[in-house]
Image (tube, helix red, strand yellow):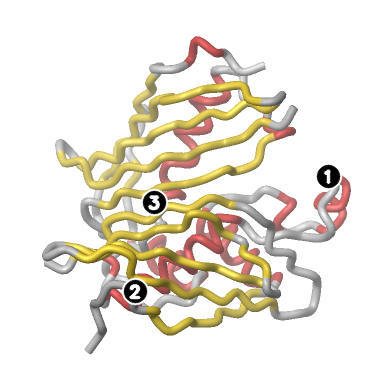
Amino acid sequence: MFNPDAVGKSRKSSTTFKVTQESISNFAHAIGESEIINSSVTYSIMISLGPSQALLEENGLDWTRVVHGDQKFQNNRPLHAGDEVTCTSTIETYRAVAGNEIVTVRTDLHCGEELAQVQWTTLVMRG
Amino acid sequence: MRKVELGYQIPAETYKINRATLVEYANAGGDQNPIHQDEQVAKAVGLPDVIAHGMLTMALAGRYVTKWAGHSAAVTEISSRFTKPVVVPAGVDVEITISAVIEEVSARQVKLDITAECAGVKVLGMAKATVSLL
């Protein structure tokens, strides 16, 4: 059972993620893109995955019954090699509907003081 | 020159993926969930076979929108629901066809309604993107 009181809980990653040209190129290559200076539109999922999962696990997320419901990216700018990204994940909403539990976590990706990108991930825990 | 007009249907693109694509995406995107690589694990959790990462399909939608926009910096938002799995059997290329319609135009940006289909089934729901015209 997910902690229903987790809404509003927030967690800032203790380490920064340093974006490399190699990781931007690998991601672009995997999806068949040639643009490799700017990160691909959904590249930053690889940065947010760990921090957002850690926050959800702390609050009782049961991975054995999770499906990815939906995903949103708000990209104020693409990421580039050399960017040092800090993630702050916040549990925005939680609800139980018809035996399923649905949780949305927002992750803010800052480069220094600049909010470069924001993601929303909604996971469904099936009953 | 791209056409920016309400209701304009942007030409569809078809992308081929296979098991090797899933391994490459898992390594590049950091999601090593075995249901995207291991047939036995996938079947054990009730799936028909290995399925593609939902985020891979979404990444292809991002690629499609980026191509139309000209560069990824112009794509300021993209969102999607994952409605149906993309099943990727061993030894075959699976085709994902992506298209979009311009559903909103302003001086600053356009909003696109995206469709992603695999074998005639829509695999993304409520897929939208915002492209800056500035």
- Spot occupied by residue A14 in the image (x, y as percentages of width and height): 36, 27
Identify the residue at horizontal 57%, vertical 13% (top origin).
A3
Residue depth check, mark 1 versus mark 3: number of the one nearer the observer: 1
Counting from the top left corner in percent of width and height, residue A31 is at 50, 71
Q: CA distance from mark 2 to mark 3?
A: 31 Å
The disc labelled 3 sits on which kind of residue? Ser
Where does label 2 land, which residue? B7
Residue type (three-letter) at the residue carrying disc 2 = Gly
- Judge from the rendering whether residue A39 lies leftward or rightward of residue B86; answer left or right: left
Q: Nearer the viewer, residue A6 or A88?
A: A6
Residues at marks 1 and 2, CA–CA distance in whole angstroms: 41 Å
Residue B58's spot in the image, x, y percent?
Answer: 50, 60
Q: Amino acid at mark 1?
A: Val
Up-down: is A9 above or below A102?
Answer: above
Q: Residues within 10 Å of mark 3 (few under 14, many from 20)?
A: many
Disc marking residue B45: 1
Chain of the residue under the numbered disc 2 shown in the image: B
